[in-house]
Image (cartoon, rainbow, N blue to C red):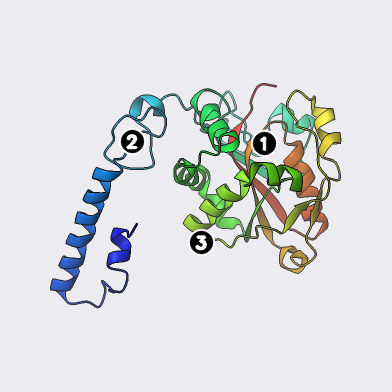
Amino acid sequence: MTTPDAISADIDPTTAPGGVRRLTRRIARAGRAALDVILPPLCLSCQTRLPDHDTLCAQCWRRIDFIRPPICDRLGIPMPYDIGETMISAAAAAHPPVFDRARAVARYDGLMREMIHDFKFRDTHHAKRLFGRWLTQCDPIIIEQADFIVPVPLARTRLLSRRFNQAQILANEIAQRSGKPLLPTALTRVRATAHQVGLTRLQRERNVAGAFAVNSFYAPQIAGRAILLVDDVMTTGATASAAAKVLKAAGAQRVDVLVLALVTEI
């Protein structure tokens, strides 16, 4: 389907005469209005009619438990009170992660859990633009400080069965919105791992130990750079730490982690 943007793609609004610019805007508005009749903007969860695409209605929005400061600087988990300076949680002090900082959009419960399950297991990607917007707004500083964006890879067998890597879709959305370069295959899984659900912290660490490797082609680009590692959900941080370990072994100066959701109760 030809989009309103495609209709006027050959017209530069900065150099076109005023009449042409006005006509271009009218065509774009008419095109968007016609498209909204065919594909009306609906809430991504309950399908309520909305003024704009790629968002939630107010009622569904309230079902997302967004994570807001104060948070642990290392793990990104919510803290009970703000002491006015950088804070480290007891969990981060007891089990320091290999990565430098982690940030999450929301807790992994309620509607966020439902939306991620649809995205991950039911091949429903209509929320990816909303996810991308949430991720880029979560902590603009770690995105700004990143040199490259790297998604957590899936094992080949799991990728073949699922047909997509949800972390790569999210990383691509962040890269498009931020302008940061994406290295989609810089990190690889060298062995399959069991599902992490139901495992203890120690079992999770053992499960993913040695599961990742840096693609040697990208090693020179990674050396001395800040990497933003992207995934959908983080529980104990075992997967992120295993990935960060090989990235730092390849010379990465720092590795920060950005995820959609954080499991805060294990």
Disc 3, SS: loop
Mark 1 surroundings within 10 Å by alpha-carbon count, few (fewer than 14), some (14 through 19), many (20 or more): many
Disc 3 to disc 2, C-alpha distance: 28 Å
Task: For the residues labelled 1 and 3, say whether their Cβ atoms are less than 8 Å apart.
Answer: no
| Number of numbered tags placed on the structure image | 3
Location of residue 74 by image quarter? top right
Q: Position of residue 101 (x, y in %)?
A: 66, 44
| Quadrant occupied by the N terminus | bottom left
Of residues 206 and 197, the one nearer the viewer is: 197
Disc 1 to disc 2, C-alpha distance: 34 Å
Is residue 201 left or right of 54 when viewed as pictured?
right
Q: Which residue is mark 3?
A: 179
| Label ID, residue 75 | 1
Q: Position of residue 39 (x, y in %)?
A: 31, 43
Q: Which tag, 1 or 2, sits closer to the chain's start?
A: 2
| Label ID, residue 42 | 2
Q: Is residue 106 visible?
A: no
Indicate the amino acid at tag 1: Leu
Q: Is residue 148 above or below residue 79?
A: below
Disc 2, SS: loop
Q: Is residue 264 visible?
A: yes
Residue at left offset 54%, top offset 51%: 141
Location of residue 10 by image quarter? bottom left
